[in-house]
Image: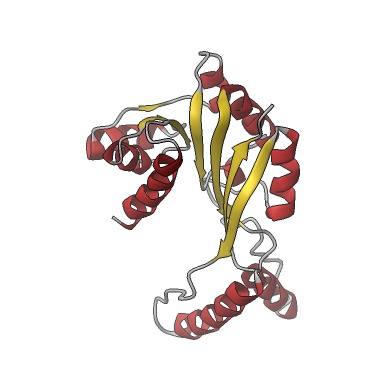
Amino acid sequence: MAKLARDEAIALKIAAIYPHAKVLDVGSGRGEFLVAATKVGLTSVGLELSDAMVEDARATYGVTVLNETAEEHATKSQSYDAFVLNAVIEHVMDPDALIKHIRKMARPGALLYIDCPNEPNLLTQAGDIISRIRRSPKVLNLAPTFPPYHVWGFNLGALKVLLDKYEFQIDSHRIYASPKVPSNGGLDTFKSLIATQVNRIANLTGRAHNLYLWSHLKSP
């Protein structure tokens, strides 16, 4: 339910600007955003490459998610008022091509929302220092190291360069992470306490783990 609430907040922000927007959700997962978009009166289309997720979206929420990439979808001459990349761009092998094809489908003034890890961030840097002290090869950058992998790391500067290339202007951003890191008990409790304090400092200094960004396509 927390995911649905977050997606509804994104959908409401889009609806406040374009009340009857047509939205493309790239990397729809189980389709929560499509449910939220419908709830606030938006028309939405979802793309997802995981067959299991496509089926789960249909079974759980009764929504249809297309099993295709943004590049494939762009060949259908579709156009949209807004695009949502929620925990997606860090998994894409060619982010430049993704934004390029979104630009092709973007109507004048189209919105683009991006949610991705902020790299580097204070928590992963602290973890990497601990690994070096312990003479461990383990690093926390681009975590997780299991499917679906993070293959690119982004920060505000990197995203600005990419978005500028395709005429998207950044309107607002937030760098934030939930301070509380959950624990499984035992020694993990101590690690959780330390990580929670690191996250609190990171939020105060703009070096937290998550980056949330809104942009729009510049006028010609």
Q: How is the image coloured?
A: secondary structure
Residue drawn at point x = 48 percent, y = 69 percent: 178
> Percent position (x, y) of residue 88?
54, 43
Front one among 197 and 156: 156
Report the side of 199 relative to 44 (left or right).
Answer: right
**Image position of 74 (left or right of 48):** right
Pinpoint residue 36: horizontal percent, then vertical percent: 32, 43
Q: Is residue 145 among what the camera can see?
A: no
Residue 17 figure quarter: top left
* Residue 117 in view of the camera: yes
Q: Nearer the viewer, residue 195 or 2?
A: 2
Q: Quadrant of the C terminus?
A: top right
- Residue closer to the observer: 32 or 124: 32
Q: Nearer the viewer, residue 43 or 149?
A: 43
Name the spot of residue 27 as percent of width and height, x first: 47, 37
In terms of image quadrants, where is residue 144? bottom right
Apparent side of residue 134 relative to residue 210 in the rendered image (left or right): right
On screen, residue 198 above or below 120? below
Q: Give residue 195's position: percent from left, percent from top.
A: 55, 78
Give the total number of marks visible in the rendering.
0
Residue at the spot 39% in from the left edge and 76% down from the top edge: 184
Residue at the far top in the pictured view: 76
Query: In which quadrant is the N terminus drawn?
Result: bottom left
Q: Taking 123 as reference, is 213 above or below it?
A: above
